[in-house]
Image: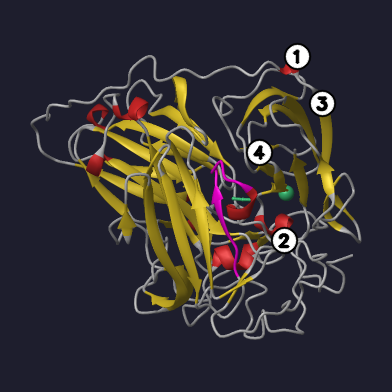
């Protein structure tokens, strides 16, 4: 198997490994929430916006008094935010000045195979030679490797949504993303802009991650010892990682000052393995503080109100929170009910103390959009995928470790299929190319977080979930995988081929 020869690290089988920082951690709520800069195009014409990103090492200030060497898109973590218009082509040239190969995937993008950032389509670092790098001998010659640079073309012929881009290199996505390779890519369209939702400075992306830090401030990750990634050195076996430091937009437990107005919060769980249950504390009188207006694939038909939000890796929830429901001066913490100690807190919103209630021109309409229902009874085929840990093989789908070039399914373009996922542990299951609609959990109705178009669904331990997916266009090779990044790296991934 491609993952033989890896070393078992301590931990409980099947469960992510808790990582303790040896660096001193700051007290929460000492730093303002950073907002990733919006990237400017290098060129723009009637149909296309063109961008350039250099992936490089950067020394970041995350913890007080220490520096953290990160792998970055353009020098920052998170990377710069790309903002696109639905239907306008976005072209991004990535240059790799990092010490290792990379592959860039636009998560949630409806992207043809050539630009999908398939894990075997590598960009080798500038200065390397064209050859199969270490660990890629099992690629079956399926990838298209480029040297130094690669240009990705995104048609973005899709609805307004919160997408994100991240590394997707086969076998190394966990450590690469952990080291900083992730950023937002927002898509806007006319339908969304016609709604009176909060915008501009009150439309805020929140990338939530967990990390741990070594005493010198560097990222602590089991496979990130100094020799990690060097050709000839084996990679560790991983079940997942749980950091003890919560970062929001790259800052530990930050604070955002808010007015007593509505804010749109685009929450992304970009953690490798951690699942959150987020809640505002205190809750406003009457509860239902988190008004969900969108999910992975854009606007919901109608808002869904929540007291708490369960969020697995790669899921996005688009929320509106009305801070006018709080008294002036209230400090509202965003807490994580699944965490303990330092991981029970995420960030804080400090509500303005001004006594006068400002006028709010925004609203959450009772009807947001039209979501066409996929009818599971009209599915061309139902397929079952078992996501499970197979002793001695790895994290597998239907008992198989990932093998590039082997198609687990060959959906026909223009048809709808039902995919049934059966799961042993928590597996946030992600499908490339087309979004899906959850139609059942354990044979019952979908859950409170399943509304709308999704591209990632958390299938709970010992349970099943079914979703309907319509493959519309773009023939080629795409991916089905677990978005627990260590499960993914340990081979819980499969190609499917549309035709
Ligand atoms: Cu967010 Cu295939 O990944
Ligand atoms: Cu998994």
Of marks 4 and 2, the one in the foreground: 2
Mark positioned earlier in the residue sequence (4 or 2): 4
Residue where numbered disc 4 is placed: 458
Q: Residue at x 45, y 55 (%)?
A: 91
Q: Which image quarter holds the C terminus?
A: top right
Mark positioned earlier in the residue sequence (1 or 4): 1
Q: Residue at x 30, y 61 (%)?
A: 30
Of marks 1 and 2, the one in the foreground: 1
Examine the image and state in which quarter residue 43 appears: bottom left
Q: Residue at x 39, y 15 (%)?
A: 367
> Most prominent secondary structure in the magenta stretch?
loop
Q: Residues within 10 Å of mark 3 (few under 14, many from 20)?
A: some
Residue where numbered disc 1 is placed: 377
Residue 170 in the image, given as x and y percentages of width and height: 70, 63
Cα separation between marks 2 and 3: 27 Å
Q: Which image quarter holds the N terminus?
A: bottom right
Q: Residue at x 64, y 67 (%)?
A: 122
Whether ligand 2 has any atom under 8 Å from the Cβ at mark 2 is answered as no
SS at mark 2 in the image: helix
SS at mark 4 in the image: strand
Considering only vertical position in the picture, is 374 above or below 311? above
Residue where numbered disc 3 is placed: 382
As for residue 109 lying within the magenta part, the answer is: yes
Residue 378 in the image, given as x and y percentages of width and height: 74, 15
Task: Write down the region rendered in magenta.
Answer: 102-112
Cβ atoms at labels 1 and 2 below 8 Å apart: no
Cα separation between marks 4 and 2: 18 Å
Residue where numbered disc 2 is placed: 489
């Amino acid at each position: 198997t491609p993952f033989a020869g890896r070393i078992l690290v301590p931990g409980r089988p099947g469960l992510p490994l808790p990582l303790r920082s040896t660096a001193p951690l700051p007290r929460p709520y000492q730093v303002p929430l950073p907002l990733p800069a919006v990237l400017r195009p290098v060129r723009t014409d009637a149909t296309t916006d063109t961008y350039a990103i250099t992936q490089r090492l950067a020394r970041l200030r995350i913890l007080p008094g220490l520096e953290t060497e990160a792998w970055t898109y353009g020098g920052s973590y998170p990377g710069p935010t790309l903002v696109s218009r639905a239907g306008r082509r976005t072209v991004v040239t990535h240059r790799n000045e990092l010490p290792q190969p990379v592959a860039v995937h636009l998560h949630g993008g409806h992207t043809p195979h050539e630009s999908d950032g398939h894990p075997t389509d590598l960009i080798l670092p500038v200065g390397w030679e064209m050859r199969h790098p270490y660990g890629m001998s099992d690629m079956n010659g399926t990838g298209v490797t480029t040297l130094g640079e690669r240009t990705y073309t995104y048609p973005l012929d899709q609805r307004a949504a919160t997408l994100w881009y991240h590394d997707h290199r086969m076998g190394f996505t966990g450590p690469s993303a952990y080291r900083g390779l992730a950023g937002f890519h927002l898509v806007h369209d006319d339908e969304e802009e016609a709604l009176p939702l909060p915008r501009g400075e009150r439309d805020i992306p929140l990338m939530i991650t967990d990390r741990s830090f070594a005493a010198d401030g560097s990222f602590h990750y089991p496979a990130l010892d100094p020799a990690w990634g060097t050709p000839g050195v084996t990679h560790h076996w991983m079940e997942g990682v749980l950091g003890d430091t919560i970062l929001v937009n790259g800052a530990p437990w930050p604070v955002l000052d808010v007015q007593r107005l509505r804010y749109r919060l685009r929450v992304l769980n970009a953690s490798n393995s951690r699942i959150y249950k987020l809640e505002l504390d205190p809750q406003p009188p009457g509860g239902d503080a988190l008004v969900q207006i969108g999910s992975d694939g854009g606007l919901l038909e109608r808002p869904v109100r929540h007291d708490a939000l369960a969020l697995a890796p790669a899921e996005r929830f688009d929320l509106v929170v009305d801070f006018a429901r709080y008294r002036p001066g209230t400090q509202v913490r965003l807490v994580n009910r699944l965490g303990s100690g330092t991981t029970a807190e995420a960030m804080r919103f400090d509500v303005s103390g001004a006594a006068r209630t400002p006028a709010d021109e925004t609203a959450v309409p009772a009807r947001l959009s039209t979501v066409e229902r996929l009818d599971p009874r009209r599915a061309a085929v139902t397929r079952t995928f078992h996501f499970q840990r197979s002793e001695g093989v790895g994290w597998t789908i239907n008992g198989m470790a990932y093998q590039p070039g082997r198609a687990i399914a060959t959906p026909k373009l223009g048809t709808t299929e039902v995919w049934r996922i059966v799961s042993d542990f928590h597996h946030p299951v992600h499908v490339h190319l087309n979004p899906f609609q959850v139609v059942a959990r354990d044979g019952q109705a979908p859950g409170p977080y399943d509304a709308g178009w999704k591209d990632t669904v958390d299938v709970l331990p010992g349970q099943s979930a079914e979703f309907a997916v319509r493959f519309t266009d773009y023939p080629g090779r795409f991916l089905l995988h677990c978005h627990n990044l260590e499960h993914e790296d340990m081979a819980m991934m499969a190609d499917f081929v549309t035709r």
